[in-house]
Image (cartoon, rainbow, N blue to C red):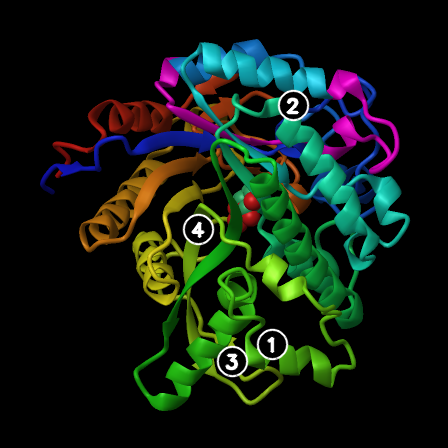
Amino acid sequence: MASMQFPEGFLWGAATAAYQIEGAANEGGRGQSIWDTFCRQPGRVRDGATGEVACDHYHRVDQDIALMRDLGLQAYRFSVAWPRVYPFGGGPLNEEGLAFYDRLVDGLLDAGIDPMMTLYHWDLPQALQDRGGWANRDIVEHFETYARTLFERFRGRVHRWVTLNEPLIVSQLGHLAGVLAPGIRSHEVNARVIHHLLLAHGKAVEMFRELDMPGEIGITNANTAYEPYDESSEHLAACELARDFDSRLFHDPIYGRGYPASVHKFYAERGAPFPIEPGDLPTIATPTDFLGVNNYSRRVVMADRRPIGFRFAEPTLPVQPMGYEEAPDSLGDFVRWVSKEYDSPPIYITENGRGDEDGTEAAMLNDQKRIELMRGFLAGLHDAIESGCDVRGYYAWSLMDNFEWAFGYSKRFGLVYTDYETLERKPKASARFYADVIRDNGLTGAT
Ligand code: BGP
């Protein structure tokens, strides 16, 4: 393989999320989140795991920043725990919670690492869930208050902001399949959740402009690269339908196209129309500065009469412990598709990586499969950039092994190994590989 240089100024980072790493769930004035509740419900999370301690990042923040510096990271994407800042969702502000993020952001800036702040990565204050959560339109106002607090506090220190992480997963897995918090299964609730997530995003972007905030704001969506089973018209149409229900659902409204007609019809037919009020769609379409792309794999799509009109073909590539295919081309393919579909928005890859099934420490540290897959992902991304896609940075998921939601601690996504007994961090082979990528601004010398 020839050397693959990324554009000058390309930003190399890693990503985490508050509930997955912070721990200190009952400290510093933090309120309860829907994940604390979900973890306490028997059978919800593998092995009854919780994020109560997680990686104990809350107490080890300085050490973790030093670790990032040692890896040569240029950027770090993290999320703020809403219940640390507003323990009851609305109501009194918890200064101690904000002070934790001051320490994190200032530490990153001192280390020359660019902070990217995600406002919402799934840990909704339980007090808001008790009032209907994302299904209740009042949440939008609470989110605005929360966003304003963070904008004003971190103005000029944080330059890259993400409103929401993967609203698709919040809705689909949290409110339809019910396998993530808050564990609801309802089309009616889900339609409301989808709309209020998008509206909260739009209101935050509007506010960012009103406050004349320096820096950039965008949203991070979850994406699968869809491929038709073959080029026949029925499978091609099924593939488009899959894209409607996944990617287009959270991209079309943001890029001013409203909801995909097929999805709109699906919910309306189930007596659960999107609760759109006058002015909502223009708010949702307030222009953003970048698109955050998360991608882990692909799916091959086939036509199917029931119930939506498509289904997924059996995997033909090796299957990862997470259950999806080892598909190195998926990242570049998705970036090409989304760039074409939405007129080449500036993109940051806000997550991409691989999860290992937990095993011996020695096996986890020698993570050759992760390296191999990352190499493939990055080669595909490089091709997409060469073909004109405007990709500005890449944040590997994840900086360190952490609480993988309903999988508990059974899956390890880190570049750095977390010993959950001692909480010691140990860089894996992939961390060294990635440090070289950063140093060389690309892939060099590999065969
Ligand atoms: C994303 C989440 C991350 C992380 C990651 C793991 O959906 O934003 O928080 O958990 O997934 O990968 P997977 O998509 O396999 O769950």
Q: What is the CA distance from the residue labelled 4 to the residue labelled 3? A: 21 Å
Mark 3 or mark 2, which has the lower sequence index? 2
Answer with mark 3 or mark 1, whichever residue precedes in sequence.
1
Q: Secondary structure at mark 1?
A: helix
The label number, if any, that marks residue 310 in the structure image: 3
Residue 296 spot, x, y in % from top left:
44, 51
For ligand 1, the image quadrant comes to: top right
What's the residue at 66%, 13% (across, down)? 59
Q: Tell me if label 4 and label 2 are in contact, CB under 8 Å.
A: no
Q: What's the residue at 15%, 32% (across, down)?
A: 444
Q: Is residue 140 left or right of residue 311?
A: right
Cα–Cα span, label 4 and label 1: 24 Å
Q: Mark 4 — residue?
A: 296
Which structural element holds mark 2?
Answer: helix
Q: Check residue 153 in the rendering and tell me which mark sits there, or answer none.
A: 2
> Quick one: 168 or 321, which is closer to the camera?
168
User: Does the closest atom of ligand 1 sit within 8 Å of the Cβ of label 4?
Assistant: yes
Q: Residues within 10 Å of mark 2 (few under 14, many from 20)?
A: some
Residue type of the residue flagged with mark 3: Phe
Q: Amino acid at mark 2?
A: Arg
Q: Is residue 353 visible?
A: no
**On screen, residue 381 above or below 244:** above
* Residue placed most toward the observer, 53 or 381: 381
Give the camera-side residue of 251 and 400: 251
Nearest-to-viewer mark from 4 and 1: 1
Specify the segment rendered in magenta.
Answer: 70-97
Q: Which residue is mark 1?
A: 263
